[in-house]
Every structure is written in C-alpha cells, then in structure tokens.
C-alpha cells in the first residue's frame, strides 16, 4: 500500500493535477506569512542597540542563507531517489530546485554584502561563511550548467543527480576547510550576530520569514516542476488532451 | 581482454594507457610546460620582491597545479570515448570502478608525477626555504592523486559533450577548494617553521576518501554519459 501510494504520487499526471490544486494555497499562505513577517520585522521589532535599523536586512538574509543549504540537500536527496528507484518525478524536482537554490544563495550573498558595507566597512570579507556560501553558488551554477549542456533531459537529470551527490559529500568538507583556513589566517576579527541569544521580538519575524521562504520555495518548485513535467510528457495522451481542452 | 582475472585487466589497462602516453609525449609535456609557465608569470605580474614571492609562492604553485591538472583531465576518458573503447569497458565483466582506478592511476603517472618532479625547481624560483620545498613535495604527492580522482568524476559527467571543457572547470574547481586550502597552508606553515602533521593527515584523509568514493561515482557517471 505504501509503495502504491508513492507510485501514484510519482505519476506525472497525478502530480500535475495535485500540484495545480496545492499551488494557490501554498502561495496564499506564503504571502500571509511574508506580510506578517515583514510587519513584525520592519515595524514591530525594536532597532538593535548597536546596529540600529540596518540589522533588519537579516530577516531576508538569514532565511535566504538557510534555504540555500536546505535546497541543495533537497536536490541531492531527490536526485538520489531518482537514481535509485528511477522515479522520474524526483529527477524533475531535483532539477527544478537548482535554480531556486542558486537564487537564494545569490540573495544571501547580496544582502550580506549590503549589510556588510555599513557594518564591516567593506562589501566583501573573506570570512569563512561568506566563502563557503560563494562556493555553494559555484556548485549550484555547475549543476545548472551541466543540466543545460546535455541535450537528452533524462540523461541530464541523472548526471545532475550524481553531481549533486558528489557536492553534498563535499559541502561539509568545504565548509570546515574554509572555516579552518580563515581561523588560521586571522583570528575571529569579524563579529557576527553573536549576542548570547536573539530577543523574542526579533526571533518571531525571523521565523515567520523563514517559513515564508520555505513556502515560497514549495510553490515555486511545484510550478517549475509542472512546466518540466509538461515538457517531458508532451508526447503522451494526457498532455495532448490538456492542450486540446484549453 | 584475453584473461578473465581482474588484476590482469587492471595491469593491461594501465600498461596500455602508459604506452599511449609515451607515444604521444606532448600529453606529458604540455601540462608540465603549462605548470611552469603559469608559475613563472606570477613574479612578472606581482613584482619580484623576494618576501612577497615567498609569501604567495605556495598558493601560486598549488593553483598552477590545479589548473595544469584541469587542463589534462579530459585526456582520462576523451579518446576512449571517441573510439568506443569506453563502451567496451562498460560491457566487460569487470567492475567498472576498478577499471576507473587503473585509468586514473595512469593519468596521475602521466600528469601528476611530472608536476611533482619539477615542483622543487619552482619552489627554488619563488624563494621557498628548503623545509617548505620538502613539504611542497609531500603535499603534491598526496594531493595530485586527489586532483585526478575528483577530476575523473567531472570528466565522466562531461565526456559526451561537445564543449565539455568550460563546464568541467565549473564542476571540478569548487571541489578542489579543500585540497587547495590544506595543501597551500601546509607549505605556508612549513615555511614559517611550524609542524604540519595535521595538514598532512587531512590531505591524506582527502586522498583516502576520494580514492574510496570517486571511482564509484565515476563509474556511475560513465554509465549515464554512455547511455
């Protein structure tokens, strides 16, 4: 029964219908959380005693950085599922995640840079976290470039899955090597948000934004996956029917 | 393959690749020349101040080694892919991952080992102290096989593509970051007269890890590229 459920879920046609119904709800929930998070973050939360108002960029920056790592893991897991059980939908999900993950990584880097200019006095520091985030962006770009370079999309998806798995093994190594490299070169001169604990009035908007970002990812990845499914299944009966009825 | 035994297949494959390389000497010489050229460009670009050169020397040599390895990577599978030999490997009864190790070992003997031999000369050119040069040799000895092993995954993924080269560097270079950090740092630390056992242990760990995982990933990638 368990198996049946997954096979039903993984059938492109079923997925297309279900995701079509889910997307509006996810999008609405995402918008609600976004508005709440922005309201609490920009209006309700008090200014920081050291950083003033400029800390508020963290309500975008921190969730984006979380998502950048989360999506890479999702991509690798989906890729592995696609490789092992030959579930096409998992491949579709993996590749649909790649460019969203890359955008979140880029967003985290840009917002970090904008925050760093007034705080650290420079746009870029070769700090451990910044550097591993930059390398993560390169890993995402590699995945996207490889997918686009291979003409046959099934082969491309499987190649990408292998690359994502190699990447996911390497991410902790890269992270720690970079951290270690940085601490070897210079002591912890860069102070991050290292207050003992974040105040509740700032934590609530942060978590709201984090959930909003998660939902954003959920509905955008479904939208992208639907397009991908349609493109891959364009020669099948149900897609033709769909095209004719519309 | 006339015999069914795996060790025999392994040595045959290794011998074949080495013979091919000896017949095309440019394959051995070009990456080497590139390595020396890139390294000697840096003093011209950043100035010949001995202190400066000594400070950036380890990094320069290692970055040049990465680039030289990258340049030669395609040779692991490209010609075998083009003449169909690779398909025969996949069809053979031997585990592909072991054959991959033979290919990578051959690639390392052809391109990695020469870098190792010439690197003391570059160390002297950049004014590294004697101890640092010895550590440079050790890091290159442990590290260049990692370059070939990780690179093999990238080549296996891109071998079917017409313009694989650019993508290959995008795939492989980020994965080289930890090795670059540990190795260049080891030489730096040795130049400062400090112990480097920890660095060398970490590089050895990278070697063991890539030796155990990368042949599997390479074999899987080859199957996909040839499907």
Image (cartoon, helix red, strand yellow):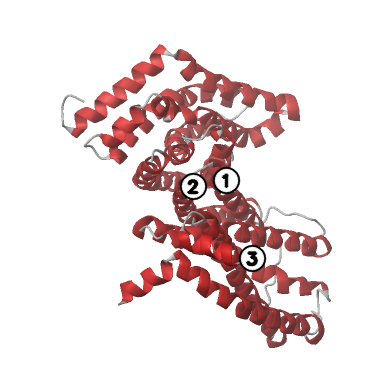
**Along the polypeptide, which appears first: circle 1 or circle 3?**
3
Residue A204 position in % (x across, y down): 67, 85
Q: Quadrant of the N terminus of chain A?
A: bottom left
The residue beneath circle 2 is A156
Percent across and percent down for residue B98 are 28, 38
Kindly check if marks 2 and 1 are in contact, taking CB atoms under 8 A apart as contact: yes
Label 1: how many residues lie within 10 Å, few (<14), some (14-19) or many (20+)? some
Residue B174 image offset from top left, x and y in percent: 56, 46
Q: Secondary structure at mark 3?
A: helix
Viewer-proximal residue among A207 and A226: A226
Q: Secondary structure at mark 2?
A: helix
Label 3 environment density (alpha carbons within 10 Å; few <14, some 14–19, many ≥20): many
Q: Earlier in the sequence, mark 2 or mark 1?
A: 1
The residue pinned by badge 3 equals A65
Q: Chain of mark 1?
A: A
Q: Is residue B190 in sight in this rendering?
A: no
Residue pictured at 64% horizontal, 76% vertical: A210
The mark found on residue A148 in the picture is 1
The answer to whether residue B112 is above or below residue A229 is above
Helix, strand or loop at mark 1: helix
- Relative placement, left or right, of B11 versus A11 is left
Residue appearing at x 52%, y 47% in the figure = B178
Is A189 drawn above or below residue B196 in the view shown?
Answer: below
Mark 2 Cα within 10 Å, few/some/many (few <14, many 20+)? many
In the picture, measured across the screen, residue B115 lies left or right of residue A223, that is: left
Q: In this image, A210 relative to A80: left or right?
A: right
- The tally of labels here is 3
Q: Nearer the viewer, residue B123 or A151?
A: A151
The reply to whether dot 2 and dot 3 touch (C-beta < 8 Å) is: no
Q: Earlier in the sequence, mark 2 or mark 3?
A: 3
């Amino acid at each position: 029964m368990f198996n049946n459920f997954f096979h039903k879920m993984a059938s492109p046609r079923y997925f297309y219908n279900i995701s079509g119904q889910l997307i509006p709800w996810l999008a609405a929930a995402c918008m609600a959380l976004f508005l709440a998070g922005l309201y609490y973050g920009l209006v309700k939360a008090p200014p920081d005693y050291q950083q003033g108002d400029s800390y508020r960029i963290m309500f975008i920056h921190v969730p984006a950085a979380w998502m950048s790592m989360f999506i890479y893991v999702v991509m690798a897991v989906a890729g592995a599922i696609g490789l092992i059980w030959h579930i096409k939908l998992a491949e579709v999900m993996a590749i649909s995640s790649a460019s969203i993950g890359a955008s979140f990584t880029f967003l985290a880097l840009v917002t970090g840079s904008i925050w760093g200019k007034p705080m650290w006095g420079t746009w870029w520091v070769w700090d451990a976290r910044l550097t591993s985030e930059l390398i993560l962006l390169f890993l995402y770009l590699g995945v996207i470039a490889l997918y686009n370079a291979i003409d046959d999309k099934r082969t491309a998806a499987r190649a990408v899955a292998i690359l994502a798995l190699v990447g996911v093994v390497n991410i902790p190594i890269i992270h720690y090597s970079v951290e270690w490299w940085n601490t070897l070169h210079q002591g912890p001169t860069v102070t991050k948000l290292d207050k003992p604990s974040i105040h509740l009035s700032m934590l609530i908007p942060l978590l709201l934004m984090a959930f909003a970002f998660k939902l954003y990812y959920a509905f955008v990845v479904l939208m992208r996956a639907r397009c991908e499914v349609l493109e891959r299944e364009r020669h099948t009966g149900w897609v033709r029917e769909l095209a004719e009825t519309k | 393959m006339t015999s069914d035994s795996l060790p025999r297949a392994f040595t045959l494959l290794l011998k074949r690749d080495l013979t091919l390389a000896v017949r095309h000497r440019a394959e051995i010489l070009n990456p080497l020349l590139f390595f020396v050229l890139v390294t000697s460009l840096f003093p011209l670009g950043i100035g010949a101040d001995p202190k400066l050169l000594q400070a950036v020397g380890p990094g320069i040599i290692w970055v040049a080694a990465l680039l030289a390895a990258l340049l030669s990577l395609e040779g692991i599978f490209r010609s075998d892919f083009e003449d169909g030999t690779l398909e025969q490997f996949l069809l053979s009864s031997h585990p592909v991952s072991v054959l991959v190790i033979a290919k990578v070992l051959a690639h390392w003997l052809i391109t990695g080992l020469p870098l190792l031999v010439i690197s003391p000369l570059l160390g002297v050119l950049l004014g590294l102290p004697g101890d640092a040069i010895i550590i440079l040799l050790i890091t290159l000895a442990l590290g260049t096989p990692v370059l070939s092993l990780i690179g093999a995954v990238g080549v296996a993924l891109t071998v079917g593509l017409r313009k694989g080269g650019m993508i290959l560097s995008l795939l492989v270079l980020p994965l080289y970051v930890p090795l670059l950090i540990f190795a260049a740092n080891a030489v730096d630390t040795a130049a400062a007269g400090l112990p480097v056992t920890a660095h060398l242990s970490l590089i050895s760990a990278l070697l063991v890890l890539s030796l155990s995982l990368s042949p599997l990933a390479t074999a899987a990638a080859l199957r996909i590229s040839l499907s």
